[in-house]
Image: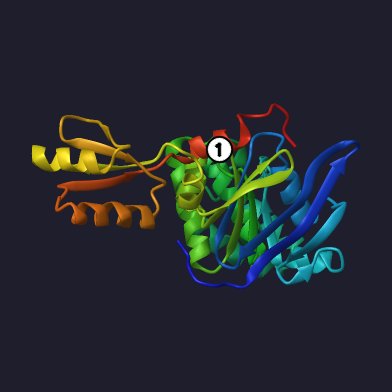
């Protein structure tokens, strides 16, 4: 994943949005560095899609300071639109056109010369492994092919920032991983990705930063590793080759539990580097060497459920 300081591609301060008396977004703050993947997690109804619609100029915010691609959303929405691309939950592919025709149509919408549209279409058909399907009607495509074409259409305008609103929903595991590879390639080329998803593994695999949105508020934000340390239940596992070493360690770590056999200890821990170092230092102090050490932390499913209490029913 990407490290080091990067200028913000998206900066949000105090974003608010209500529909009637229902508060959907309650003063949320976000910052997405350039050339990274930012994932917004949340149950149905948390406000993920509403956030994307506001940041992509499709919906007006009730309040807040928003800068996207260097443009103030309120003062320069046209500038924002020139910098972004959006792939929504529902495909924008025209199923009565071929893959090539869909891409050329997008070029027309971007006011590109027809020859340039055709050239860009060829490049994207190759890039998204759609050459053999280029002149086939889109309603014959599989779900994975349709989503690849949908994302290819988003790239016709060469956006610097792409909003992906649950881009792999409904795809089989293989097609999902193909999409992950495409997303990683885009970021390697300098594109910034704002990703909403309910697939916890997807956020874990892709995101540099994750924010959990619940009841209109950001309830946690950080890397996947940082979020996992928020939930109790992690431990450091120590394996020993000799009984006397095991017994000495068991005495030294009074909170440890015996697991997985006679010579294995589990020491409650948040899994942080500092915690691992403290365990190793303690082993040195008592003159004991472990044959193996591994860190076990809760996964993002545990984090998500702990922070949100489960899934809401309505989708906003």
Secondary element under disc 1, as helix, strand or loop, is: helix
Query: Residue 257: x, y in percent?
Result: 28, 33
**Residue in the foreground of this view, choosing between 284 and 9:** 284
**Residue in the foreground of this view, choosing between 253 and 22:** 253
Query: Residue 253: x, y in percent?
Result: 28, 42
Query: Residue 50: x, y in percent?
Result: 76, 45
**Residue in the foreground of this view, choosing between 216 and 244:** 244
Q: Residue furthest right?
A: 20
User: Which quarter of the rendered picture does the C terminus lie within?
Assistant: top right
Q: Which residue is mark 1?
A: 304
Taking the image as shown, residue 53 lies to the left or right of residue 206, namely right
Q: Residue at x 48, y 58 (%)?
A: 184
Q: Residue at x 15, y 50 (%)?
A: 288
Colouring of the image = rainbow
Q: Is residue 69 visible?
A: yes
Q: Residue at x 52, y 63 (%)?
A: 187
* Label 1: few (<14), some (14–19) or many (≥20) C-alpha neighbours in 10 Å: many
Taking the image as shown, residue 183 lies to the left or right of residue 85, namely left
Taking the image as shown, residue 271 lies to the left or right of residue 138, namely left
Is residue 316 shown above or below 31? above
Query: Residue 95: x, y in percent?
Result: 66, 40
């Amino acid at each position: 994943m990407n490290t080091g300081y990067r200028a913000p591609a998206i900066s949000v301060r105090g974003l608010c949005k209500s529909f009637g008396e229902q508060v959907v977004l309650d003063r949320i703050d976000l910052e997405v560095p350039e050339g990274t993947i930012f994932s917004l997690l949340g149950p149905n109804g948390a406000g993920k899609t509403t956030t994307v619609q506001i940041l992509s100029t499709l919906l007006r915010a009730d309040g807040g300071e928003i800068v996207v691609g260097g443009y103030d959303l309120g003062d320069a929405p046209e500038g924002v639109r020139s910098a972004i691309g959006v792939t929504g939950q529902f495909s924008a592919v025209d199923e009565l056109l071929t893959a090539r025709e869909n891409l050329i149509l997008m070029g027309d919408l971007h006011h590109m010369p027809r020859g340039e549209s055709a050239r860009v279409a060829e490049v994207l058909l190759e890039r998204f492994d759609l050459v053999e399907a280029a002149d086939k009607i889109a309603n014959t495509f599989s779900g994975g092919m349709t989503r690849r074409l949908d994302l290819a259409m988003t790239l016709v305008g060469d956006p610097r920032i792409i909003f992906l609103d649950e881009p792999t929903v409904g795809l089989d595991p293989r097609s999902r991983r193909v999409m992950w590879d495409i997303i990683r390639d885009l970021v390697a080329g300098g594109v910034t990705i704002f990703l909403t998803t309910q697939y916890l593994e997807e956020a874990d695999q892709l995101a540099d930063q994750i924010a959990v949105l619940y009841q209109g508020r950001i309830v946690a934000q950080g890397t996947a590793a940082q979020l996992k340390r928020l939930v109790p239940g992690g431990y450091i596992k120590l394996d020993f080759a000799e009984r006397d070493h095991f017994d000495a360690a068991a005495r030294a770590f009074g909170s440890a539990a015996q697991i997985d056999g006679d010579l294995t200890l589990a020491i409650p821990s948040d899994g942080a580097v500092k915690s691992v170092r403290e365990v190793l230092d303690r082993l040195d102090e008592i003159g004991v060497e472990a044959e193996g050490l591994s860190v076990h932390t809760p996964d993002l499913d545990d984090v998500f459920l702990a922070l949100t209490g489960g899934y809401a029913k309505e989708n906003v």
